[in-house]
Image (cartoon, rainbow, N blue to C red):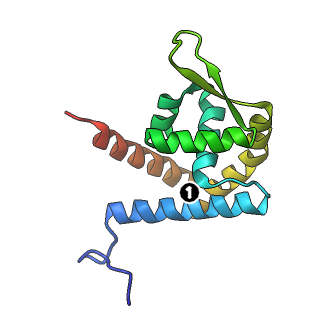
Amino acid sequence: MNMYCPQPDGRESLGALIGMVRSEIVRAIETDLASQGADLKFTQFHVLKRLAACGPMTATELARAVDLDGGAMTRQLDQLESKGYLRRQPHEQDRRALRIELTEAGEALWKHLYESNTATLERAQRGLSATEREQLHDYLGRVLDALRDKD
């Protein structure tokens, strides 16, 4: 059975292309994680990456940043906490909230994985010139802004 179903003009739809690119990036990152002995799936890697980039945040903020619902976020946090990569701390301003932060082990793991992540994303863009890379980021950013714009 032929799984390739392009549009009438012979090209993939924008949604299909973006989905396939995301799937290939996830596959490549998970392959790199496995080759380095990191016992992580992409979603866990993404959580660590967001915490490394943005610093401590609440579980709600983190769930929004990595596009997970509350239940899925709790499962990821439980797994990463059991591996020693993050901890839940009381929030300074809100007694009802917890602040999620990387542990020293989580920071060390992220530093170890950072170069691999950068190399994977570089591989994904190797056929593009510097100008084309800038244009791709600009185009995707504008598409994202348009989709987020509720007006």
Q: In this view, does 63 lie above or below 44?
A: above
Q: Determine the residue located farthest toward the bottom in the rendered image.
A: 1
Q: Residue at x 64, y 58 (%)?
A: 29
Query: Which amino acid does the dot numbered 1 rest on?
Result: Ser
Q: Residue at x 27, y 36 (%)?
A: 149
- Which quadrant of the figure contains the C terminus? top left
**Residue density around tag 1, few if under 14, some if 14–19, many if 20 or more, within 10 Å:** few
From what the image shows, is residue 92 above or below residue 21?
Answer: above
Q: Where is residue 144 in the image (x, y as percent from the top left)?
A: 36, 44
The secondary structure type at the circle numbered 1 is: loop
> Measured along the vertical axis of the image, is residue 28 above or below residue 134?
below
> Along the line of sight, which residue is nearer the eye, 101 or 148?
101
Residue in view at x 49 percent, y 59 percent: 22
Label 1 sits on residue: 129
Q: Quadrant of the N terminus?
A: bottom left
Quarter of the image where one finds residue 24: bottom right
